[in-house]
Image: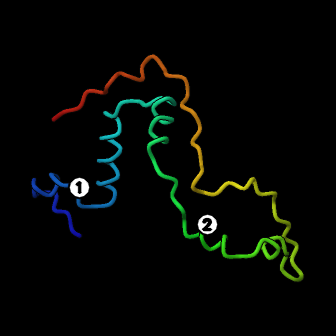
Amino acid sequence: MEIDPNDDWSFEQPLTAIARVLCLCLMSFGALVRDQAWRNQASKKLPVWKTSFDHTRSQIPERELRQNPPSSEYSPSESSGRTASEYLPSSSPIESPTQRRRIPTRS
């Protein structure tokens, strides 16, 4: 897609991937910081999603999962039994004193 620098309208809408990412970044600066308590409350409301990997893996007998391919140097790591759906994000860093300040922008 061509962008015409002389056309004022072409800069009104984010038409390129870079412009869209920039818009998302700028919008995120105005979002409130959410703490771990908010994340915990939100995660209680969300369902656990089953991924296609979870379903596919559940169809393989446990003894086959433990087998190594012939002539392979691969050694599987011990699985904690958790799935990708159960990932818990790390907690937020300590809030800095300037975190709630907004950077002035031109309209």
- What amino acid is found at the position of numbered circle 2 in the picture? Asp
**Toward which corner of the image does residue 54 lie, by quadrant?**
bottom right
Residue shown at the point (35%, 21%) measured from the top left: 101
SS of the residue under disc 2:
helix
Residue shown at the point (89%, 81%) measured from the top left: 71
Return the residue at label 2: 54
Which of the colour schemes (rainbow, by chain, secondary structure, one colour) is used?
Answer: rainbow
In the depicted structure, whether residue 48 falls above or below residue 95: below
Residue 14 in the image: x percent, y percent?
23, 55
Quick one: quadrant of the C terminus?
top left
Residue 103 in the image: x percent, y percent?
31, 27
In the depicted structure, whether residue 47 falls above or below residue 32: below
Residue shown at the point (51%, 58%) measured from the top left: 49
Along the line of sight, which residue is nearer the eye, 18 or 89? 89
Return the residue at label 1: 14
Earlier sequence position, callout 1 versus callout 2: 1
Disc 1 from disc 2: Cα separation: 37 Å
In the shown orientation, is residue 71 left or right of residue 100? right
- In the image, which disc is placed on residue 68? none
Along the line of sight, which residue is nearer the eye, 98 or 72? 72
